[in-house]
Image: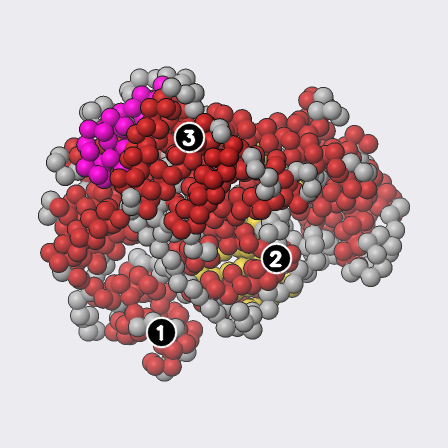
Amino acid sequence: MNRAGRFLTQPVSPCACAAPCGPKRLRTSNGPGRCYRTSAAPVCGQSSRIPNERLFGGRTVTHRRSDGRESPMPAVARGDQGNLPQELTSFVGRHGEVAATRRLLGESRLVTLTGVAGVGKTRLALHVAAATQRSFPDGTWLVELGEQFDPQLVAGTVAASLSIRDWSAAPPIDMLTDYLRERRLLLVLDSCEHLIDAVATLAETLLRSCPDVQILTTSRERLLLGGETVMQVPPLTVPHPGHPISARTSAHNEAMALFAERAKASVADFEITDDNREAVARLCRRLEGLPLAIEIAAARLRMMSVEQILEQLGKVDILTDGGRDAPRRQRTLKASIDWSYELCTREEQAAWRRLAVFAQGFELDAAEGITADDHAPNELLHLISSLIDKSILTREEYDDGHGVRYRFLDMIRAYGLLQLEEAGEAPEIRRRYRDWYEQLTQRVDTEWIGPNQARWISRLGRERANLREVLSHCVSQPGQEKQGLVIANALVAFWLARGLLHEGRLWLSRVLDAYTDPSAERVTTLCGAAMIAANQGDINAASALLGEAEALATTLHDSNLDETVAETSGHVSFLSGDLDHAVELFIPLLRRVRDGADRRRHLSVLYGLGLASALHGDTTRATDSAREILEITTPRGETIYNAYAPFIEGLSVATDNPARARRLWEESLQLNASTDDIIGSALCVEGLACLASDAADHQRAAILFGAARSLWTSVGNTGVIAPRLRAWHRQLEQRSRTALGTRAFNIAMHQGMKMTLGETLDYTAADTLPAHTTAQSPSRLTTREHQVADLVAQGMTNKAIAERLVITPRTAQGHVEKILTKLGLTSRTQIAIWVLSRPPPDTD
């Protein structure tokens, strides 16, 4: 790919899917909560769980079940502004840099902020992104790459940051471009220097394929792409040596203002006075205006004065630390961190270097797990608190506000890892690290079918970086390969639940390559890889993996492995469209698993048998399977399979009793939405659209087909789960298109595509469209804007439009922005759809 400026793209490959998806990040509801299956308090004793505020807006509506009873159901708020973290401390200075960066974003679609470590690139980027949110209707999104070292996972990391589920066998970049093609948003790609080629390739593809996406990157080096605008982020201004420092001067000096602001967090009554003003100025000059070094120094005011900090810092030889060939400011920052490390107690130093093994943070139980032999729990908590006070660690709350996570800045963690190596402790600490995450994943595996399912999915989501680090260590270190296999096996259900199929398949492939000895673990891993490949629609690969697993299981003579192979084979057969073979495998297997202790396998078999039987026309078996699922899941508080039961039953009666099917699918939609299951929600919306078309309610059908398409796009999937359902969908969509006419059908479908999941829930319940989806009057546009809209629909860029209409590209861009604002649209693709479906324009 040409990094000099030629942008390339690749087509998106179709795929199929059929596996329960679970919640992404869940927020525990206030109050005792109620089960969705009954109106009584939950048997499990747990409060019900509802999606977080990024999806649901906090107001509660009533969900009426098919049996007439009601349960609380959160409603979805309009729009999603992104995932930028809240600023926990004030943003000081940088007025010129903020203005310059905003100006550059108005002129270029790719802006890179460069500068030395610790200069504040990330903070500046996040501040600018937050300040420009109103310009991006589809949000401003942070993608943290600082602790991601695998180039193959860069696109997947971006997708995960955007909350896109990966259910496609196509490369993640294809799914990502397909999702972003019609969206207008800002991506902030943070800390790119160690992945510069992979990030450049990704940015190049996105900019070429997604005309309304802009990218702001932070990196120590530029991406070297055509159209890239680079801004060097300087250190904060420091007082000029030899000039008198007045109260007014110090208040307006950026470095001194930052020191004063952060110092107040350490010593509440700290102020810059005539007595300490010159010392603060010297300190800021000594630290060369580097924000991170200034913040580390300010945290020391709890224990010493400004003059004492200067004295201690003076003992560190900045001219030699970091190497004489290193940039001076890099040596300054290293000296500051060296100094901070030396001022820690021996116990604090030990905690710093040992806890640095965690990637992207840790929770208290994990820290206790790897330091149990060194510190008592109470002592460890004291040490963590002390490191927070010294600005070595930061404290973050979970999304649900009910827990705490601790994290190092990237360079402070890197320093700790160096100290860990120098202390000779790295092998032992990494062994404990690996063992703790193996224990965690095994516990999750054991407790998966139960009331803590949603909590475990959220926890593993927070631990993705650590799990990657552990798996990478296992496949690269001799003698640890089998443990990598065991950990990967335990993560298969999580990868399926979170829609991380590409990442899961990548790690399963790596652990299989690393450990090739015949074993039960290898059979299980092969089956897990086959299940993921089949859900991606890659049936050939799934069949090959399954064949290897079956051959190996035969040699091991283990009945449990035989069941694993039969279960996987049933799902692969179903996903390939061979319903007869799937039913033949599932029926005898169900008899066996009922007598066993593995409830997850029991539910998996019932799920597969229920779907296959429903599509095969066996209403009784499908209904029995759905009800048996409820008998298992309801008393245990399980949520994923529980939400699919009404979908299976509705599928079995859709032909003979469409009214009942609609009630069941609306119930399943509510339940799947409540657990943030996009696949399950899309299936229900798809089914409801088909029922509406079959009932000749073609307007409703077109809107729901559009809503379903939007959901499928967000998971990189082409829609529905089996060939028979695809054929049914195509037939009924064409029926509604013919009945309404292409123009009217496109307008209605576009209305559905603009709805959020919560608005789709409201629409299915009351046939009420949100105001923002109603068609805008074409008379709102001027004649020139109509001309520009027509050229946008022809696929022209702003430059091409400018040449055609003899205007400047900036003026063309302004016309496009006005069109988007007037019509309530968010992308050029939506303008094209509007042009195709509108009546002829009025003249001015």
**Which segment is the magenta one?**
610-635
Q: Residues within 10 Å of mark 2 (few under 14, many from 20)?
A: some
Spatial CA distance of label 2 from label 3 is: 43 Å
**Residue 806 percent across, percent down from the top left:** 36, 82
786 or 16, nearer to the observer: 16
Q: Residues within 10 Å of mark 1 (few under 14, many from 20)?
A: some
> What secondary structure is found at the residue carrying circle 2?
helix
Is residue 174 visible in the rendered image? The answer is: yes
Task: Report the amino acid beneath label 2.
Answer: Leu
Left or right of 275 on screen, residue 809: left
Q: Are marks 1 and 2 in contact (CB under 8 Å)?
A: no
Task: Report the amino acid beneath label 3.
Answer: Glu
Which residue is located at x 42 percent, y 52 percent?
169
Quarter occupied by the C terminus = bottom left
Up/down of 801 relative to 89, above or below: below
Sequence order check: which comes first, mark 1 or mark 3? 3
Picture disc at residue 195: 2
Between marks 1 and 2 in the image, the one whose residue lies nearer the viewer: 2
The residue under label 3 is 563
> What secondary structure is found at the residue carrying circle 1?
loop
Task: Report the amino acid beneath label 1.
Answer: Met
**Residue 536 percent across, percent down from the top left:** 40, 48
The residue under label 1 is 796
Spatial CA distance of label 1 from label 2 is: 33 Å
